[in-house]
Image (cartoon, helix red, strand yellow):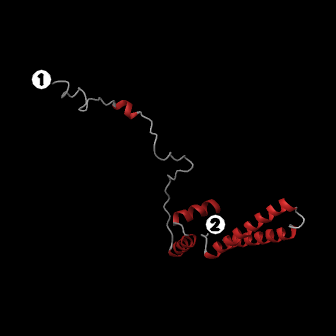
Amino acid sequence: MFLSAKNSPCGSHPDGLTPNIESMKHAKHTGGRPPLGKARKQEYRITLRLDTEHKLRLQALARAAGRPRTEVLRQLIAAGRVRERLRREHLDFMSQLKGMARNLNQLTRLAHAKGLTGIVSRHTAIVASIETLLRNLRDDR
């Protein structure tokens, strides 16, 4: 039997197109997530042995922060402390803060329209209460 170009191992592809494998290997990948840089890539693994007391303390920190234990350890290494996740009281502080910010914006508009002299006392009171709320939020976390 004779081999034709159609069924020859060196012949054309069944759909009539010859795939150029070399050009497919060197084609630029245009989709997907861009690769992480060396600084952001977490490629080092460290094994840590803990006694029961330290393990329970780590679990308590992770539970309070609402993060995995590995993330808690990363934060401890980077900053020396772990920030707790926002609690209900924090969200209440933030909603009060938003209301005060709205009032401050309204007073600022009024000051631009009518002048600053009549607004100064209310403005300083709102700014003082905003500073107090921010201090409470920072100290509580």
Q: Is residue 83 above or below residue 11?
A: below
**SS of the residue under disc 2:** loop
Q: Say which residue appears at 64% left-offset and 61% top-offset.
A: 79
**SS of the residue under disc 1:** loop
User: Residue 140 at what x, y percent from top left?
Assistant: 68, 73
Q: Nearer the viewer, mark 2 or mark 1?
A: 1
36 or 20, nearer to the observer = 20
In this rendering, would 84 be left or right of 3?
right
User: Residue 78 at what x, y percent from top left?
Assistant: 62, 59
Residue sticking out furthest to the right? 117
Label 2: how many Cα within 10 Å (few below 14, some 14–19, many 20+): few
Q: Which quadrant is the N terminus positioned in? A: top left
Q: Which quadrant is the C terminus positioned in? A: bottom right
Q: Say which residue appears at 42% left-offset and 34% top-offset.
A: 27
The type of residue carrying mark 2 is Arg
- Quadrant in which residue 74 is drawn: bottom right
Circle 2 residue: 81
Q: Say which residue appears at 49% left-offset and 67% top-offset.
A: 49
Circle 1 residue: 2
Label 1: how many Cα within 10 Å (few below 14, some 14–19, many 20+): few
User: Residue 94 at what x, y percent from top left?
Assistant: 67, 70
Q: Is residue 5 above or below residue 60?
A: above
In this rendering, would 119 be left or right of 46?
right
